[in-house]
Amino acid sequence: VQLQASGGGTVQTGGSLKLSCTATASAGSTFELAWFREAPGKGREFVSMISWSGGSTGYADPVKGRFTISRDNAKNVGYLQMNNLGPADTAVYYCAADGSYHAYSTWYQDKSEWHYWGQGTLVTVSS
């Protein structure tokens, strides 16, 4: 799976952005999608994930109620709608994909469980 993230930019506090993650994969491939972010001087942290069917989603506590993850499998694109952004959301956002089996329910929060990564897109929120 090859991933390309886009949609980053600079917004003011309280603004919104929608990130996209375009996937290129073999026909018949199924995989979960996730977004992680890496703020300056910090490690890469989980933001959100969505199952292949879209029936299951997960969010990190700091973004719950503000971010919404979705996907369009017909277009091979995943999205992250980000509302009410604040300076703490400033980071490089990465999309990730994985289609393998995972033995525990919260596996998606662990970046080492994701095998495919996009190149990242920078989101800057000014105060």
Image (spheres, rainbow, N blue to C red):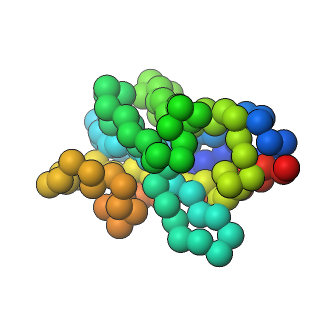
Looking at the image, residue 86 lies above or below residue 55:
below
Residue lying farthest to the left in this orientation: 103
Q: Residue at x 84, y 42 (%)?
A: 12
Q: Quadrant of residue 53?
A: top left
Mark count = 0
- Work out whether residue 112 or residue 82 is closer to the camera in this orientation and state it: 82
Coordinates of residue 2 in the picture (x, y in percent)? 48, 52
Is 91 left, or right, of 44 in this rendering? right
Coordinates of residue 105 in the picture (x, y in percent)? 21, 48
Asked whether residue 77 is in view, the answer is no
Asked whether residue 96 is in view, the answer is yes
- Work out whether residue 14 or residue 116 is closer to the camera in this orientation and state it: 14
- Work out whether residue 116 or residue 127 is closer to the camera in this orientation and state it: 127
Coordinates of residue 3 in the picture (x, y in percent)? 51, 50
Is 115 left, or right, of 4 in this rendering? left
Q: Residue at x 42, y 28 (%)?
A: 73
